[in-house]
């Protein structure tokens, strides 16, 4: 017969084993068996594997990108199509079309930010396809960017002066910068732009005064403009004002020029003769009022 103490020890052992069994079952539910994980691993790997995209799908993507104006995205998709694809001629035509449009897109940056964006697009395309046209464009962008940076502060100053009506100061700023920088095409282009705008505005203002027969005012406008920008265009406008004020002004001028040209053809030294013809055929400029 077992003693009371033995029975008590057996009960304690059974109780401890029961507790351990419960703990083991709980752990098994929380952490599934490694065997299950190893069997699921191939399935997860298969699900995450990237399947190759067919040439048809790539071409379809490229058409969508091109249609939305994303020519860089289209060219990246087209670069993945193998040239052995039976319909590669279509892809080749789309490549040429997208390259032309992307080149136009990166050809006229107007700010530093735009220059950097154009360089980014060109570099991204060159990573997927080597293109002589884009290699040349990259070289030009780098050169233009440096010239643009050099001209940026000058153009900013001239623009502020021009917009505030200080036309003489604006043109002088650009002219001085162009002389010191040599051939900066950005400064040169801005100078030409402002000259054209100024000449057009003066011409329009003078024409309005001519229509109202205010020849003196029209002449004063042009003379003042010539002090700001002495150019052939404004000299022609001044001549036009005088011709409108006095119809005979043009006739006298033409006669004098023809006579001087004829005399010059017969003499080697035309300076004295030129002075004589200037005296004979000189036309005194009026104050802008017609002499009729």
Image (spheres, rainbow, N blue to C red):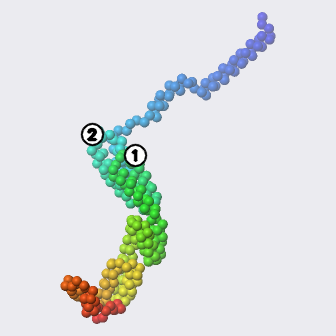
Q: Is residue 155 above or below residue 81?
A: below
Where does the image place residue 251, in percent across and percent down from the top left?
A: 24, 88
Where does the image place residue 226, in percent across and percent down from the top left?
A: 38, 81
Q: Which residue is mark 1?
A: 127
Q: Is residue 268 visible?
A: yes
Determine the CA span between mark 2 and mark 1. Answer: 25 Å
Q: Is residue 119 above or below residue 87?
A: below
Q: Nearer the viewer, residue 269 or 28?
A: 269
Element at badge 1?
helix
Residue 86: numbered disc: 2
| Residue drawn at the location 41% of the way across and 59% of the way down | 144
The N terminus, quarter of image: top right
Residue extending farthest right:
4
Where does the image place residue 23, in percent across and percent down from the top left?
A: 66, 23
| Residue drawn at the location 39% of the way across and 68% of the way down | 188
Residue extending farthest front:
268
Where does the image place residue 128, in percent across and percent down from the top left?
A: 38, 45
Q: Is residue 157 left or right of residue 33?
A: left
Residue 62: numbered disc: none
| Residue drawn at the location 46% of the way across and 62% of the way down | 149
Q: Nearer the viewer, residue 234 or 275?
A: 275
């Amino acid at each position: 017969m077992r003693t009371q103490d033995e029975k008590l020890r057996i009960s304690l052992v059974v109780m401890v084993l029961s507790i351990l069994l419960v703990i083991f079952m709980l752990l098994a539910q929380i952490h599934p068996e490694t065997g299950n994980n190893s069997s699921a691993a191939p399935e997860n790997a298969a699900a995450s594997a990237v399947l190759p995209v067919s040439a048809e799908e790539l071409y379809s993507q490229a058409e969508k990108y091109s249609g939305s104006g994303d020519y860089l995205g289209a060219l990246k998709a087209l670069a993945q199509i193998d040239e052995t694809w039976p319909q590669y001629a279509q892809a080749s035509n789309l490549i040429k079309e997208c390259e032309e449009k992307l080149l136009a897109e990166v050809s006229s940056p107007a700010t530093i930010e735009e220059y950097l964006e154009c360089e980014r697009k060109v570099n991204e395309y060159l990573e997927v396809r080597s293109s002589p046209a884009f290699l040349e464009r990259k070289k030009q962008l780098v050169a233009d960017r440096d010239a643009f940076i050099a001209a940026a502060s000058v153009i900013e100053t001239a623009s502020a002066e021009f917009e505030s009506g200080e036309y003489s100061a604006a043109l002088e700023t650009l002219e001085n910068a162009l002389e010191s920088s040599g051939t900066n095409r950005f400064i040169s282009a801005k100078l030409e732009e402002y000259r054209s705008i100024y000449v057009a505005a003066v011409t329009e203002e003078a024409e309005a005064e001519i229509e109202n027969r205010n020849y003196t005012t029209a002449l004063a406008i042009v003379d003042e403009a010539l002090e700001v920008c002495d150019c052939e265009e404004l000299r022609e406008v001044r001549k036009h004002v005088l011709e409108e004020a006095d119809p005979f002004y043009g006739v006298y001028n033409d006669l004098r020029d023809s006579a001087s040209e004829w005399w010059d053809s017969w003499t080697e030294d035309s300076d004295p003769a030129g002075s004589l013809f200037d005296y004979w055929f000189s036309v005194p400029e009026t104050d802008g009022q017609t002499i009729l």
